[in-house]
Amino acid sequence: QVQLVESGGGLVQTGGSLRLSCAASGSIFSINVMGWYREAPRKQRELVATITTGGSTVVADSVKGRFTIRRDNAKNTAYLQMNSLKPEDTAVYYCYADGRADTGWGQYWGQGTQVTVSS
């Protein structure tokens, strides 16, 4: 079993910054992709950014140039640095990971952390 624990959400004013962290723990053999998705009220969950073990990233156009994802493979931890935040970034941010654990290959989600950007 794999657990993803997120931290770093909160309330910030427009133009401010926040950093999210996601630490994976449990019976992990290897993690391939880590990243974040977000879900705003009355909207579908959408990809924000992902990063592979090798450092290849995918970043949504809506956050490109403002959000940066990085990863510490030794710690099984990913970070999302969010700068120049806008009210439309307000959402619950969910950490995602996929990889091999004692139960085989799987996809895992964190519990979600609220990010609120006030105008």
Image (cartoon, rainbow, N blue to C red):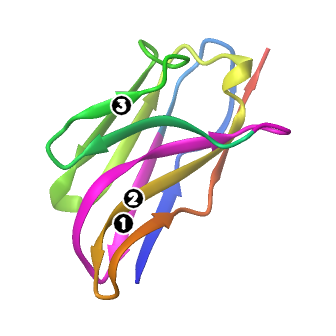
**Farthest residue in the front direction?**
105
Q: Is residue 115 visible?
A: no
What numbered label is drawn on residue 97? Answer: 2
Residue at 55% from the left image edge and 13% from the top image edge? 84
Element class at badge 3: strand
Q: Is residue 82 visible?
A: yes
- With 88 as the anchor, is 113 left or right in this view? left
Name the residue at the right extreme.
42
Please state the total of marks drawn on the protein image.
3
Classify 10 Å Cα crowding around label 1: few (below 14), some (14-19), many (20 and above): many
The residue labelled by disc 1 is 24
Span shown in magenta: 20-43
Secondary element at image label 2: strand
Q: Residue at x 41, y 27 (%)?
A: 59
Magenta region, main secondary structure: strand
Tell me which residue sits at (43%, 48%) in the image: 21
SS class, disc 1: strand
Q: Is residue 41 magenta?
A: yes
Q: Are marks 2 and 1 in contact (CB under 8 Å)?
A: yes
Q: Residues within 10 Å of mark 3 (few under 14, many from 20)?
A: some
The amino acid on which the numbered mark 2 sits, given as a three-letter code, is Ala
* Label 2 close to label 3 by CB (< 8 Å): no
Type of amino acid under label 1: Ala
Q: Which mark is residue 58?
A: 3
- Indicate the quadrant where residue 91 lies: top right
Mark sitting earlier along the chain (1/3): 1
| Separation of marks 1 and 3 at Cα, in angstroms | 20 Å
Task: Tell me residue 26's x, y (percent).
Answer: 34, 80
- Mark 2 and mark 1 lie on one chain; the one further toward the N terminus is 1
Tell me which amino acid carries mark 3.
Val
Query: Looking at the figure, which quarter contains the C terminus?
Result: top right
